[in-house]
Image (cartoon, rainbow, N blue to C red):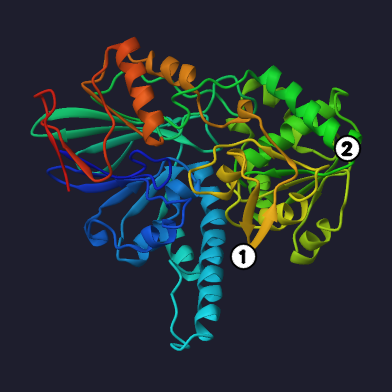
Amino acid sequence: MNITFLGAAREVTGSCYLVETAGTRFLVDCGMVQGGREAPARNHQPFAFDPKSIDFVLLTHAHIDHSGLLPKLTRAGFQGAIHTTMATSDLLQVMLPDSAHIQEGDAERARHHVRSAPDRGVGPIPLYTLADAQDCLDQVQPIPYDQEFIPHLGVRCRFRDAGHILGSAIIEVWIIEHGQTTKLVFSGDLGQPGRPILRDPTPIEEADIVIMESTYGDRAHKNMTSSEDELVEIIDRTLHEQGGNVIVPAFAVGRTQEVLYHLHRLTREGRLRDLKVFVDSPMATAATRITRQHLELFDDAAKHLADWHALGKGLPHLQFTASTDESRALNQIRSGAIIISASGMCDAGRIKHHLRHNLPRRECGVLITGFQAQGTLGRRLVDGAKRVRIFGEEVPVRAAVHTVGGLSAHADQPALLAWSASFRRPPARTFIVHGEARTAFAFAERLRAERGWDVEVPEPGTRVQWTSGAGGGGHDRS
């Protein structure tokens, strides 16, 4: 068996792993690279394998850095099933068409630019189209959590709750070769234990090979109480003392719903008051509706607050904007508004308009609640940029930029170590992925020191060979 680390190796986005056995070839995730000027070119590069040769795909969750190249894969000739959880399947119905819309829009803007050049009429084609996304969705096969299934002869799988976003999964894979069984565990993106709404990540007891994320593998989040105190203080000061707006870049799936949960609960407790909240993301609106349809995946605390989704009770001034006219109208609001919009890393979507209108204003605040990849607008704001470029225009950053890490949907270092402690014996080999290089190496060192595991941080393109029953093998880079 061979495993090739095609994406999210020494970086956070672009998750994609190719597994080749004596009888099959399959992918775990097929995600888009996000952040940095080179991201579009990287996403347009041909796959490092023949899509027609792939028998099936296992998908950990719906975020675009894990699912975003699936329509490109099917357009290129992949004809197999895309296996994922029930909730992820529902979310993909919204997210992949939305991504296609963005690809078509980007290509059209680029063609418009080229039409003014000497080679008028020649321009880029979209990474994929809405029709491609719809065709891809026909190949999605939802599977319930905790139910074993056989996607191909000699391969048995099971999805376990990862607690990251709705429908996110840890994937257990048993591969039978030459009469020997090897168990692989792909952590996917692990959630932070004790976080509201979703259940904690499922502990796994056995594995021969573990492929484990490390997004926040070098740090610890603030606890939820401190994070909520900080949230209240930022909102009160910005809205009521300074008379500005609070702009919240948020992933449409997961983060938007969690921010609404906190605002709703803090308002009901009397800690926040008179909030005018706007969710300006059609995809987030659809994802919130899907979230309401999966209450069975909520943790016990959220089930006891099962009417949290009846948000009008706690947030009477909550509005979900749909049209572009409604979105533009928000830019006329000078004070007292909390505007939640996508994308979460500020590189696309309506959030860029709200930042352009509010960043120059000292009385406003920007609330960062999620990971910001290198090269993104969100990362530049977190790193303290004094000026940023939005829609080709230099925008001064006078608004305060606040980072509330305790609201992160990713496990921090203590939580990652705690999850690793659930294994009854060390895996034969562990590969640390889905983290910037410095973070991944720091977590790998911690895992070696505290658990005594054999840990590697693969480079992009690393191909690992495993011989069943022999305790492992070598690796090379292709």
**In the image, what residue type sits under mark 1?**
Gly
- Which quadrant of the structure image shows residue 172? top left
Crowd class of label 1 (few under 14; some 14 to 19; many from 20; radius 10 Å): few
**Residue 342 screen position, x and y as percent:** 64, 50
Q: Quadrant of residue 369?
A: top right
| 208 in relation to 328, above or below | above
**Circles 2 and 1 in contact, beta carbons < 8 Å:** no
Secondary structure found at label 2: loop
* 437 displayed left or right of 174: right
Q: Position of residue 88 (x, y in %)?
A: 50, 44
Mark found first going from the N terminus, 2 or 1 = 2
Kindly identify the residue that appears in the image at 53 percent across and 49 percent down.
376
Quarter residue 458 falls in:
top left
Few, some or many C-alpha atoms within 10 Å of disc 2 (few <14, some 14-19, many ≥20)? some
Q: Give left or right: position of 440 versus 271.
A: left
Q: Which mark is residue 200?
A: none
Relative to 375, is 328 on the left or the right? Answer: right
Point 11% across, 32% down: residue: 474
Q: Is residue 331 left or right of residue 46?
A: right
Give the quarter of the figure containing the N terminus: top left
Res 204 visible = yes
- What residue sits 51% from the left and 74% below the top? 110
For badge 2, the amino acid type reads Gln
Q: Secondary structure at mark 1?
A: loop
347 up-or-down from 323: above or below: above
Name the residue beneath numbered marker 1. 392
Q: Which residue is mark 2?
A: 242
Q: Is residue 205 visible?
A: no
Q: Which residue corresponds to the image point at 48% horizontal and 69% vertical from the top-left?
A: 129
| Residue 404 percent coordinates (x, y) | 65, 30
Q: Measure the alpha-carbon separation of dots 2 and 1.
A: 29 Å
